[in-house]
Image (tube, rainbow, N blue to C red):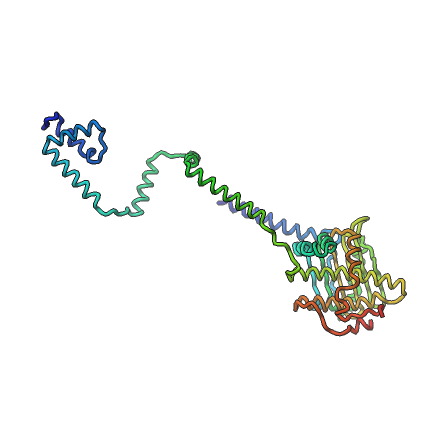
Amino acid sequence: MSRSADGANCDAVLELLEAFVDGELEPAEERTVTAHLDDCRACRREHRLAMEIRSRLRSLPEHDAPAKVLWSVRMAAREDGPTVPWRTRLVQWSRRPASAFATASVALAMVVAALVWWQRPAQRPSLDDPEIARAAQETRFALALVGELGRRAALDEVLGRRVVSATVDGVADALRKHLGSERSENENTVTEGPSEKGANG
Amino acid sequence: MKARSFAIVVVSLWMAAAVASAQQAVEQLPGYFPLEDLALFAEGGVEVDVDIQGPMIQMMAAATEEQEPEFGELASQLQRIRVRVGELRGDDQSGVAAEFDRAIGQLEAAGWKAMVRVDEGDELVRVFVKQSSDRIYGLAVIVNDGNEEGVLVNIVGDLDPELVGRVIGSMDRLPDLDELGIVISGDE
């Protein structure tokens, strides 16, 4: 066991040497080692060797560990480590400023999206839609048929003539032609001549 | 996993029941008359088959409420419009006549009142209304033109009679009837 002029024991210094090289010593220990290295040639050699090894290790290329190895290590760490309940992890996560900010941002975005969706201009139904226009026309026909028959019945009473039955032929023909042609050809007019049944009925 | 599957089944059944009850709702209204049940038309003889109900009626009401406020309001009170026009069964005229009589009997038994009643030989016209003191719940038109054609109409809703009168009154005649070349002998 050698001892330098500063009184430090070489074995004790060599034990501290790795931590000294890594800069992990307390200031007092660091001063002791530095003083010893100034006086002790053998320990200086060890120090240079340690520095060279450290330098060469840092110059080596880095390689990622295989995923399987990483997974095994994580699973082993999880099994060995303390189990933290998910609620605790959630609370811890939420207390992190970055997490709180992210949560607030997402919530704000959802509120804005909901408001935009709620206040969007509703697409109003229009008679420009052929289906709606046809439905309206068919409804008018149905209502008008009731009115027409009612009026003709009243005329029957007043005139004492067969007005309703004459109307019926015309109405049926009109409905058939008009609605039938609309349904099949989406046309609004029928250009046939006067109905024989309607004219003579 | 089982709980999730069970929840999906329950929700699906609930939605199916809701759709079925909505469908039944129209059929259970007092103004509904099942035109489809009448065996009047020849096979393939139905030439006009109109069935407007549900969302289409709502869209029609919304589309017309600005330009035609009264028609739009009346449309909003409608539940279903059903029109069938076609060739009657020619092979069984007595059966057709009996079916017309059966339909009329069903309507009268259910409390429908005949507003228009015409019987001229083989020709038959009825316009029925189902109403309370202040509402019209349904209108039904039954026509046998005596010449192989029939017209059936059922209008279902909860209608304001005055509004019905104003809307129908605003229609001087069937839309575009003149353009269609229909001449009414009573006008001659």
Up the image or down, B115 lies above or below A201; here it is above
A68 and A187: which one is in front? A187
B171 and A169: which one is in front? B171
In the rendered picture of this protein, how many numbered marks are placed on residues? Answer: 0
A134 and A164: which one is in front? A134
| Residue B88 visible, this angle | no
| Residue B179 visible, this angle | yes
Q: Position of residue B95 (x, y in %)?
A: 78, 66
Q: Quadrant of residue A167?
A: bottom right
Q: Position of residue B124 (x, y in %)?
A: 82, 64
Q: Residue at x 87, y 63 (%)?
A: A155
Up the image or down, A183 lies above or below A72; here it is below
Q: Residue at x 77, y 73 (%)?
A: A194
Q: Quadrant of the C terminus of chain B?
A: bottom right
Up the image or down, A134 lies above or below A10; here it is below
Up the image or down, A186 lies above or below B115; here it is below
Q: Quadrant of residue B153?
A: bottom right
Left or right: where does residue B12 sit relative to residue A92? Answer: right
Q: Position of residue A39 (x, y in %)?
A: 11, 30
Q: Position of residue B114 (x, y in %)?
A: 83, 57
Farthest residue, direction top: A7
Left or right: where does residue B46 sit relative to residue A88? Answer: right
